[in-house]
Image: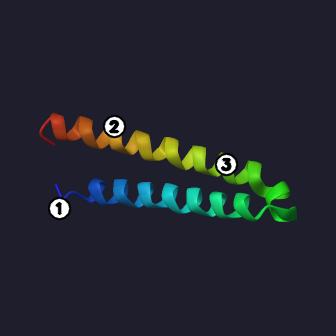
Amino acid sequence: MASDPLFYLVIAAVLIVLVILMFGIGTFSRGGEFNRKYANKIMRARIVAQAIAVLLIMLFVYLRSRGG
């Protein structure tokens, strides 16, 4: 499993989601003008990154179940 390049792509996608989530939580907790201006865009970026991560995970599971 660790030798599969798709596995590393899945790990990278999940870490990107984590970074975006932590950044969003940090800006939300501080509040201020930056949060008012960019909170929605940060949330949308997280949702897109999360959807990509879920699709990659599903692809990885599908390919592994087929023996690929």
First in residue order: circle 2 vs circle 1: 1
Figure check: 32 above or below 53 = below
First in residue order: circle 2 vs circle 3: 3
> What SS does tag 3 mark?
helix
Left or right? Give the position of 48 relative to 7: right
Q: Position of residue 37 (x, y in %)?
A: 85, 57
Query: How far apart are the two marked residues, 2 and 3, measured between alpha carbons?
Result: 22 Å
Q: How many marks?
A: 3
30 or 58, which lies in front?
30
Please name the residue shown 44% across and 55% down the image.
13
**Which mark identifies residue 40?**
none
Query: How far apart are the two marked residues, 2 and 1, measured between alpha carbons?
Result: 18 Å
Instruction: Classify residue 33 by image quadrant.
Output: bottom right
**Which mark identifies residue 3?**
1
Q: Which residue is mark 2?
A: 58
View extreme (right): residue: 33
Q: Position of residue 50 (x, y in %)?
A: 51, 46
Left or right? Give the position of 53 relative to 5: right
> What SS does tag 1 mark?
loop
Give the residue type that dot 3 points to. Answer: Met
Q: Mark 2 and 3 residues: CB-CB less than 8 Å, in contact?
A: no
Q: Which residue is mark 3?
A: 43
Give the residue type that dot 2 points to. Answer: Met
Q: Residues within 10 Å of mark 2 (few under 14, many from 20)?
A: few
35 or 13, which lies in front?
35
Instruction: Classify residue 65 by image quadrant.
Output: top left
Query: How far apart are the two marked residues, 3 and 1, measured between alpha carbons?
Result: 33 Å
Please name the residue shown 57% across and 56% down the image.
21
The C terminus sits in image quarter: top left
Give the residue type that dot 1 points to. Answer: Ser
